[in-house]
Image (tube, rainbow, N blue to C red):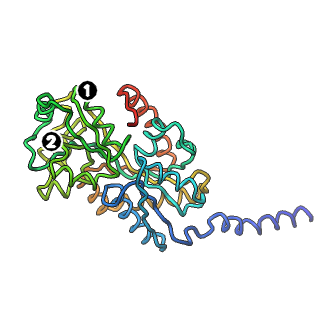
Amino acid sequence: MNKLCAALAVSALLPLSAAAQSDAYPSEPIRIIVPYAAGGIADVLARLVGTRFEALFKQPVTVENKAGANGTIAQQFVTQAKADGYTLLLGNTSTQVVNAHLYKHLSFNIEKAFQPVGLIASSPMMLVVSSASSINTVSDLLAAGKASAVPLNFGSAGNGSASHLSLVLLANMTGLKINHIPYKGTAQIVPDLIGDRLVAYFDVPGTAMGLLKAGKLKAVGVASQTPQPALPGVPTIAETVPGFEIGTWLGLFAPTGTPRERVDRLNAALRTVLDDPAFRKQLIDQGNEVRPGTAQEFEAFIRKEMVRMGEMIRSAGVKLD
């Protein structure tokens, strides 16, 4: 009898336990921290995802830009937030992988401080110049570099960023002499490029697409092994520099310790967003590859990226200025 009573008591608690685990998350606003200034692809993508999360969760989603130090300012902010699923980081190759190899004295361990939630999209880098520039091809750029008595001015989205790594890789593979000028984000680079204070920079198609269509910038090469449908007429850099290939990706991260059921809830919502045909087309038309998957698949992807990018950084001799 006592055993029966005990069993009934346990069974009575099960629904309550399940309810406690689900805890009606989310029941308050969510914020997405972007490690770059407003206007770049990370900021735009965070706002697009945030708007759709609001519709799914019936809760406000705000986007906060915390630029600087190649994303480590935003990263530190997120590591200091409660691990409750209400503060997320829009991370990328630079913040979550490259920084782990380049920064040795951070107050947090990048590999241990963040829980991958889901991969959103990936994109090849693209070499861009002003539309008024006489440079029309990668060969033109290399010839200009050889003819110049001083290194050419190149901008990037910051030390250790994907645009910086692309630049270093190009210089190492071709011998091109460059003067690297880091900015806080790509939105600040464009005025100097148009104003002829920079020769070129690397960007992702999604950020530069509007300026390309407006005729303010032109793409001279894309860093993929095959031409991109979203960039008709733009050759691959590999046609001139065999083997040149580099890209970046974007995804959502939560502080380590965030309950697994909340991570899975966020991942399911993200996959719902990415499965929407209109949203997918919007990203693909901007030169992205949409890559939905589970949080566990994203974790495995990050581990592989750590190895791949680490080898590239060491072989290219990339160091922070």
Q: In which quadrant of the rendered view does residue 301 lie?
A: top left
Q: Which residue is mark 1?
A: 173
Relative to 117, is 138 on the left or the right?
A: left
Relative to 65, is 143 on the left or the right?
A: left
Q: Residue at x 33, y 51 (%)?
A: 290
Q: Can you give x and y, in whole percent of width and height, for residue 244 in the image?
A: 25, 31
**Secondary structure under badge 2?**
strand
**Secondary structure under badge 1?**
helix
Q: Which residue is mark 2?
A: 220
122 and 212: which one is in front? 212
Amino acid identity at mark 1:
Met
Mark 2 is surrounded, within 10 Å at the Cα level, by few (under 14), some (14 to 19) or many (20 or more) other residues, namely many
Which numbered disc, 1 or 2, marks the residue that appears first in the sequence? 1
Residue at the extreme front of the image, as rendered: 149
37 and 268: which one is in front? 37
Relative to 138, is 112 on the left or the right?
A: right
206 and 98: which one is in front? 98
Q: In which quadrant of the rendered view does residue 276 lie?
A: bottom left
Q: Can you give x and y, in whole percent of width and height, for residue 293 in the image?
A: 44, 50
Q: Can you give x and y, in whole percent of width and height, for residue 247 in the image?
A: 31, 41
**Quadrant holding the N terminus:** bottom right
Amino acid identity at mark 2:
Val
Relative to 277, is 313 on the left or the right?
A: right
